[in-house]
Image (cartoon, helix red, strand yellow):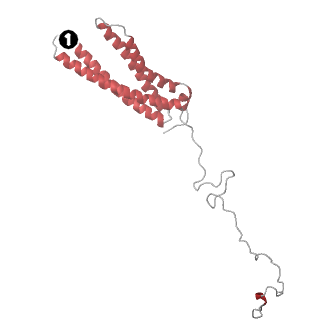
């Protein structure tokens, strides 16, 4: 059976062999470059660190304030809070004793007046020492001068002297009271009151704390 003379319609009809398959047509690959390194154009690369920022190299760190100086300043702030509370309490007690003495004629007015005046003066002195503690602590944290060192040492020294005064004065007052017991609790109180300024003064009198204020002049 023929199919209109078309050789492709009859599978028995011989055909002309074609050219062998050469594969897909060759294509030209697009060239791919390497991604640029991180950083900013126009700045030379630092080996091992890439490109620096546009602000330039970081300046070297200056000397760091020793921990002894920071501790001494913090202790000054803590002592200032304790002394402020004690001063307000002392002024309140002095006012209360004065009012109680005025309502009791059997109490010696001269003795009460003397104690009230002493307590009031002490409260004022302690409030002034609070200001000194705060100023000295701030100066120790921001300055590196001999004046800052003298302030922080003086502030702690005043607190040590006040603690010693309270130890002697309270012991004398207890001795005057009939039936007064041992003063062990009083001694413990004065030691606790003097502990913070003793440690704070020691931090800046020796070692790195003392050498810090011998450095370059600060603000």
Residue displayed at 39% across by 19% down: 163
The mark tally for this picture is: 1
Q: Nearer the viewer, residue 138 or 184?
A: 184
Q: Is residue 72 above or below residue 194?
A: below
- SS class, disc 1: loop
Q: Quadrant of residue 211?
A: top right
Judge from the rendering whether residue 206 lies leftward or rightward of residue 169; answer left or right: right
Q: Nearer the viewer, residue 7 or 211?
A: 7
Judge from the rendering whether residue 207 lies leftward or rightward of residue 192; answer left or right: right
Q: Is residue 81 above or below residue 179?
A: below
Judge from the rendering whether residue 83 lies leftward or rightward of residue 99; answer left or right: right
Residue displayed at 41% across by 15% down: 188
**View extreme (front): residue:** 1
**View extreme (bottom): residue:** 4
Residue displayed at 57% across by 54% down: 55
| Residue 77 x/y as whole percent | 41, 30
Residue 111 visible here: yes
Q: Nearer the viewer, residue 29 or 197?
A: 29
| Residue 189 x/y as whole percent | 39, 17
* Quarter placement of the N terminus: bottom right
How many residues crowd mark 1 within 10 Å: few (<14), some (14–19), many (20+)? few
Label 1 sits on residue:
108
Residue 151 visible here: no
| Residue 52 x/y as whole percent | 62, 54
Q: Is residue 65 above or below residue 158?
A: below
| Residue 213 x/y as whole percent | 52, 32
Residue displayed at 52% across by 29% down: 68
């Amino acid at each position: 059976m023929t199919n209109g003379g078309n050789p492709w319609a009859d599978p028995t009809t011989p055909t002309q062999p074609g050219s062998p398959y050469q594969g897909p047509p060759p294509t030209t690959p697009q060239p791919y470059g390497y991604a640029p390194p991180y950083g900013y154009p126009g700045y030379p690369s630092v080996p091992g660190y890439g490109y620096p920022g546009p602000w330039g190299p970081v300046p070297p760190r200056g000397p760091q304030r020793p921990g002894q100086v920071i501790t001494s300043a913090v202790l000054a702030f803590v002592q200032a809070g304790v002394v402020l509370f004690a001063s307000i309490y002392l002024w309140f007690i002095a006012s209360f004793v004065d009012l109680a003495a005025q309502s009791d004629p059997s109490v010696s007015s001269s003795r009460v007046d003397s104690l009230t005046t002493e307590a009031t003066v002490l409260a004022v002195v302690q409030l002034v020492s609070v200001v000194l503690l705060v100023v000295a602590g701030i100066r120790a944290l921001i300055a590196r001068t001999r004046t800052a060192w003298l302030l922080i040492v003086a502030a702690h020294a005043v607190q040590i002297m006040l603690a010693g005064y309270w130890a002697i004065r309270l012991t004398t007052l207890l001795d005057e009271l009939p039936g007064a017991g041992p003063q062990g609790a009083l001694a413990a109180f004065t030691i606790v009151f003097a502990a913070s300024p003793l440690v704070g003064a020691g931090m800046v009198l020796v070692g790195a704390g003392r050498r810090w204020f011998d450095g370059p002049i600060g603000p």
